[in-house]
Amino acid sequence: MSATFASLGVRNYRLFATGGVVSNTGTWMGRVAQDWLVLTQLTDHSSTALGTVTGLQFLPFLVLAPWTGLIADRYPKRRIMLVTQTVLMTSAAALAALTLAEVVQLWQVYLVAIVQGVATAVDNPARQTFTAEMVGQGLIANAVALNSASFNLGRLAGPGVAGLLIAAYGTGWTLLANAVSFAAVIASLLLMRAADLHAVPLARGKGTIREGLAYVRGRRDIQLVLLLVFVLGTFGMNFQMTMALMATTVFGKGATEYGLLGSVMAVGSLSAALLSARRERPRLRVLLVALGGFVVTSGAAALAPSYAVFAVALAGCGLTALTALTTANALVQISVDPVMRGRVMALYMAIFMGGTPLGAPFIGWLGDVAGPRWTIGIGTVTVGVTVVAVGALLLRRENVQLSYASRRQPHFRLTVGPADADLVGSSEPEVAR
């Protein structure tokens, strides 16, 4: 098996990835159908309402992060995911039933968004850290990239299929298809061999939440990555909302054309995931260059004169944004102590996805006041300013280290400074302090 797909040689991960493709396809169908429901059936193309739904879905990431990370470190991750996936399936089925019965109201969509947000907030740290348990330390970077590939395979197919289903059968049946798709992940988890997992010690005792926060406070390297991820997630990664607004209000397109935009963007994201899977280890330089590329492509999307140009720019946005996120995720996961991984990744997800409740309503309001193009333009400006500021910091040769120490594992270090101008990650073992 080629280096790109090395993790698929592990049976447990192969099951997980297969179930993930099915479930992710359904999830993207559900997102498109939900947005279409809010924009065209429950409101008169209100970007504020759409931003509120998006914010409610991601608010639990911000509020519950300390506890969801502790849950991931304290309890078996496969068991956690069986519970969360069941909750997600049930809530998706409830929204589908309400829509099919033609009794759905906006407050019900808000309620389902909150329930799914809580379930996803618990699910994500467990899912992120379960990757290492499936494949082992040596394949983490590859598996993280393949997780993104699986996600974007679903993103490639889901929006386009959703657009066709909405046009042919209606929003309710599309939402129901999403609910059914969760069964694929549940089945993959049940079929895994527990004996083949690379289990890590579970966190015990009091003060474990404070311990996790203190760990991150002492790691300037992780703080730098979290800053970049926060800005990208809060202001740059709102395409679920901005694509709907651009398609309907700027270019006057329908459900099919809107759904295709998500698939076009996923082409770029999938390409980025596969390219990332070929890299032996993540590099900070790749993260910064990718963010710079995102500034260029998102700026082109904001200024696009036609639907076709907008679609091409979205493919570039998908390529650069996914490269940045995959690199950041792998940098953090490889560099942390395994017993801390759940709490650190919960904080990572809180900062990336939890920033959306702060950004989405504001961006929705901005779309109403200044026009849909500014919903993208604000991300271009804020990400650009941040990349310039971080680049200036590194040019001043501030020392930033990505290091991971454990009595049982190698010590990984990425040093940014005069001794390492190329920002190349090192995996040489070092005696742990």
Image (cartoon, rainbow, N blue to C red):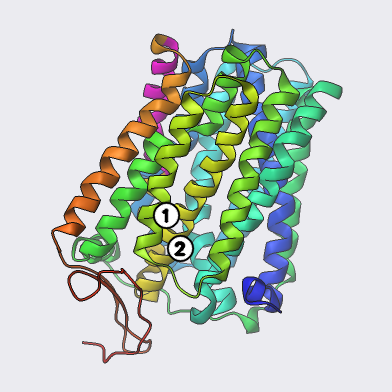
Dominant SS type (magenta) = helix
Measured from the top left, where is residue 169 in percent x and y? 85, 24
Q: Is residue 93 above or below residue 368?
A: below
For the C terminus, the image quarter is: bottom left
**Residue placed at 53% from the left, 46% from the top?**
119
Badge 2 density bin: few <14, some 14–19, many ≥20, Cα 10 Å: many
Q: Is 360 positioned to the left or the right of 251 in the image?
A: left
Residue 141 relative to residue 354: left or right: right
The circle drawn on residue 196 is none
Secondary structure under tag 1 reads helix
Q: Residue at x 86, y 23 (%)?
A: 168
Considering every residue shown, the one lying at the far bottom of the view is: 431
Q: Disc 1 residue type?
A: Thr
- Residue 367 colored magenta? yes
Q: Quadrant of the N terminus?
A: bottom right
Q: Amino acid at mark 2?
A: Ala
The answer to whether residue 79 is seen in the rendering is no
Q: CA distance from mark 2 to mark 1?
A: 6 Å
Query: Residue at label 2?
Result: 72
Please tell me which residue is depicted at 34% across the width and 90% down the height of the picture. Answer: 429
Q: Are marks 2 and 1 in contact (CB under 8 Å)?
A: yes
Q: Is residue 280 magenta?
A: no
Q: Which residues are magenta?
A: 353-368
Q: Which residue is mark 1?
A: 68
Vertical relation: 341 (above or below) 391: below
Return the residue nearer the eye: 260 or 310.
310
